[in-house]
Every structure is written in structure tokens, then in C-alpha cells.
């Protein structure tokens, strides 16, 4: 938080979520440094430690230039209410609440339907959330899980009468990670997402087949340009409960365009707020870079991903490599290396010194890793 001298911590607290602010040396703040809004962790972190959730502390770009926590988690013990949430915004000097919390619509499957969150990022004017969920647009044909990216504007203060406590800029789109062909083979379930620190242009994700079927995994990349393109495209709607989901014709989309960042969302007309309330889903999926996965393999289930970029001096020439570290559900680490070629699509090969390193699971823990230094992961 802030200059790095403080840590924000939120935990399940025996199915009663609670949050704290501590010094970075893990000691408690004195009473006179109490941070307003801290104590109750509901909607900030889950009730159950087994739940997939995400949270992000955002210092800049929020209403009133006040810091806030953005989260994606379960807001009820029963797990019936899943939420993308921003905390109340308080003046840290006076303790006064300046802006109330914002959240997704409660119990509305068009907004969220049993999501499993895998990551969130602060990018420009928006906060992006990555998750997998039951696909509402497929429900008339059966049951399927799709991967999503959703975004909210950091300046969002909700509507005046409609969506007053909800996001007025919430949109979501499907993520397409598939092997191309006349009948594409889809890896529908995102398991992990990664962005190289300092580079907001590209996101790296691991996707799998359904856990109930044949096992397979893929690594796909998405550019911020392709994500923006999907959000600037057509909206998707279902006219009646028995109708197919179809794109909304442009003449029916109100102005200003729903989902666009504006200085004051409370000034948005009711036509825009009503439209975004019922049309949060985009018609087009976000295309993966290079029109195919970076890497895919059968009988492997990736669960986590970290990416690093390195330069290698070879015969007087500097070659740029992207290195992928993918964790599996059997607690192994797969190491993949790709040369970033100037011409043509990047080629990926299993590195000659690839290792599958078993991680002991003697204790219950959350699998995760980061690139700490050129020598450590």
C-alpha cells in the first residue's frame, strides 16, 4: 500500500472474513493510525479458503483520487452471491466515507454465473478481471463453462437512480483459446493469468479442457488491443428465454456508448443504465494472439503460469526469449522457452533442460509462484 510501508491482508478467518492493515514488517498499526473501512472482510475475500478469488489494491484513478480494493469473490457463506466489488472510498485523513461501495448485480446470471476468478489487473482507466463461469449464452443448448475477461471503469460511481450501488460500466467478453480449424478445439476453462510487470500490452493465460473429460492444457496470449476491440464491438442479447443469443444491432445501442469511462457515471441517462443492466455481454470473443495457442499438450493439466523475458548473447547476437513456467495439478513445474522471432509466428519448443520438479504436498497450501530474480522462481 502507498509507499510500500504497509500491507493489506484479508483472510477467511474461520468462515468469517476479516481484513487488516499491517506494517510491512508484519507488526500492527497503533490505534491513532487506524485505516477507515478496515475490519470486515465480506466481499473482499472469500468465506472458504478453497474458493478461487482475486483482489487488487488500486492507488490511482479512483473517484476522489482515493485508494480502494477491487475484488472478485463470494460475498455469502452459501456461495450464492458472487461479486466483483470495490470497497467504500474513505478520506484517509478525516475517516469520512466519500463514495460508497460498488458491486455487480446480485443474483443476476447475466452479470456473473458461478464464476471462478483467476486474476485482476489495473490497466489504464479500467480494472480487468479474468475468470471462468457457466456460459449463460449456451444454457439453451446444455451446460458449458467459458472463460471471460470483464472490465469496470475506475471512475465508476454508479448510476443516479438505476444501478446506484452497482457498476455502471461493467462489461464482459469471452476469451477464445482454441486450436484453429473448420471445427476448432476449445480449451474453455482458464486456470491462471499473468502479466509481465510493467508491460500492460499482453496477458498470458493457461487454459484447460473440462476436468470431467479428457485432460489437455494450452497456453494462450491476448493483447490489450484485442481485448479493447472486443469491448468496442457489438453487444449480445437474448430477446426471450427461448430465443437464441444474437448480436444487438448498432441502432439500438444508446449514447454515450455503454461501458465507456465518463467523468460522472451518475449523470448517465437511464437508457444507457438500463441497457448495460441487461446487456453486459459482448458478442465477439477476444481472439488469442497468433490465431493459435503458444503451446498445447494432452494429458497435462496446467494450474499456474509465470512468464519472464530474457536476453541471451549467442555468437555476438542478442536473442530475446520468453520463458514460461507452468505449474501442474500434480505439483510439477514445466519449463518452456520461446525465441521471439522478428518475422513470422513465434515458435515454441520444450527446452532441452526441461525439468519436472515434484513439490511436496505435506501441508495444505495455495500453489503460486513468481519470478524473483534471474536465478530464482
Image (tube, grey):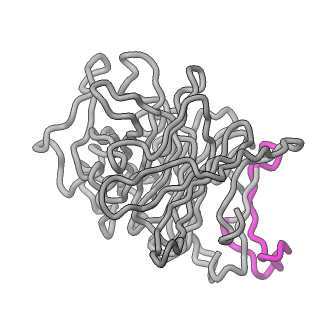
Q: Position of residue 111 (x, y in %)?
A: 42, 39
Q: Position of residue 30 (x, y in %)?
A: 83, 79
Q: Residue furthest right?
A: 362
Q: Residue at x 39, y 52 (%)?
A: 222
Q: Relative to 59, does residue 291 appear above or below in the rendering?
A: above
Q: Residue at x 48, y 53 (%)?
A: 204
Which quarter of the rendered picture does the N terminus lie within? bottom right
Residue closest to the eye, 362 or 93: 362
**Is 291 within the magenta?**
no
Which quarter of the rendered picture does the C terminus lie within? bottom right
Residue closest to the eye, 330 or 55: 330
Residue closest to the eye, 162 or 183: 183
Q: Position of residue 184 (x, y in %)?
A: 34, 29
Tell me where the magenta segment starts and ends, as one range: 12-37
The answer to whether residue 345 shows anywhere in this view is: yes
* Quadrant hosting residue 126: bottom left
Instruction: Say whether residue 266 is left or right of residue 335.
Output: left
Q: Residue furthest left?
A: 251
The answer to whether residue 156 shows anywhere in this view is: no
Count the numbered circles shown. Answer: 0
**Is 32 within the magenta?**
yes
Residue closest to the eye, 25 or 194: 194
Q: Residue furthest front?
A: 315
Q: Position of residue 146 (x, y in %)?
A: 45, 33
Q: Residue at x 46, y 69 (%)?
A: 319
Instruction: Say whether residue 363 is left or right of residue 115.
Output: right
Q: Relative to 375, does residue 367 appear above or below in the rendering?
A: above
Q: Taken as a whole, is the magenta stretch helix, strand or loop?
A: loop
* Quadrant hosting residue 83: top right
Instruction: Say whether residue 299 is left or right of residue 288.
Output: right
Q: Residue at x 51, y 48 (%)?
A: 349
Amino acid at each position: 500500500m502507498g509507499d510500500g510501508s504497509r500491507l493489506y491482508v484479508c483472510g477467511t478467518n474461520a468462515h468469517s472474513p476479516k481484513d487488516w492493515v499491517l506494517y510491512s514488517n508484519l507488526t500492527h498499526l497503533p490505534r491513532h493510525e487506524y485505516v477507515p473501512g478496515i475490519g470486515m472482510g465480506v466481499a473482499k475475500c472469500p468465506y472458504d479458503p478453497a474458493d478461487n478469488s482475486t483482489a487488487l489494491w488500486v492507488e490511482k484513478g479512483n473517484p476522489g483520487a482515493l485508494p480502494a480494493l477491487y475484488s472478485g469473490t463470494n460475498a455469502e457463506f452459501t456461495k450464492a452471491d458472487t461479486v466483483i466489488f470495490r470497497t467504500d472510498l474513505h478520506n484517509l485523513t478525516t475517516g469520512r466515507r466519500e463514495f460508497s461501495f460498488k458491486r455487480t448485480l446480485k443474483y443476476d446470471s447475466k452479470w456473473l454465473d458461478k464464476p471462478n476468478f483467476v486474476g485482476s489487473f489495473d490497466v489504464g482507466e479500467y480494472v480487468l478481471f479474468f475468470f471462468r463461469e457457466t456460459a449463460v449464452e449456451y444454457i439453451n443448448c446444455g451446460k458449458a463453462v467459458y472463460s471471460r475477461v470483464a472490465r469496470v471503469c475506475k471512475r465508476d460511481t454508479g448510476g443516479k437512480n438505476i444501478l446506484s450501488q452497482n457498476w455502471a460500466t461493467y462489461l464482459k467478453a469471452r476469451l477464445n483459446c482454441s486450436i484453429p480449424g473448420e471445427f476448432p478445439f476449445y480449451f474453455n476453462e482458464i486456470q491462471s493469468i499473468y502479466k509481465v510487470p510493467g508491460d500492460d500490452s499482453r496477458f498470458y493465460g493457461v487454459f484447460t479442457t473440462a476436468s470431467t473429460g479428457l485432460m489437455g492444457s494450452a497456453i494462450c496470449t491476448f493483447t490489450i488491443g484485442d481485448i479493447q476491440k472486443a469491448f468496442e464491438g457489438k453487444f449480445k442479447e437474448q430477446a426471450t428465454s427461448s430465443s437464441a443469443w444474437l448480436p444487438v444491432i448498432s441502432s439500438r445501442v444508446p449514447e454515450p456508448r455503454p461501458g465507456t469511462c465518463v467523468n460522472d457515471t451518475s449523470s448517465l441517462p437511464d437508457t444507457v443504465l438500463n441497457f448495460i443492466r441487461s446487456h453486459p455481454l459482448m458478442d465477439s470473443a477476444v481472439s488469442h494472439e497468433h490465431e493459435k495457442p503458444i503451446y498445447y499438450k494432452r494429458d497435462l493439466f496446467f494450474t499456474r503460469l509465470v512468464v519472464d523475458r530474457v536476453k541471451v548473447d549467442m555468437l555476438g547476437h542478442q536473442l530475446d526469449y520468453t520463458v514460461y513456467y507452468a505449474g501442474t495439478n500434480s505439483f510439477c513445474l514445466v519449463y518452456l522457452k520461446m525465441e521471439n522471432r522478428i518475422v513470422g509466428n513465434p515458435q515454441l519448443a520444450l527446452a532441452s533442460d526441461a525439468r519436472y520438479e515434484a513439490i511436496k504436498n505435506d501441508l495444505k497450501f495455495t500453489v503460486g509462484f513468481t519470478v524473483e530474480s534471474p536465478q530464482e522462481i
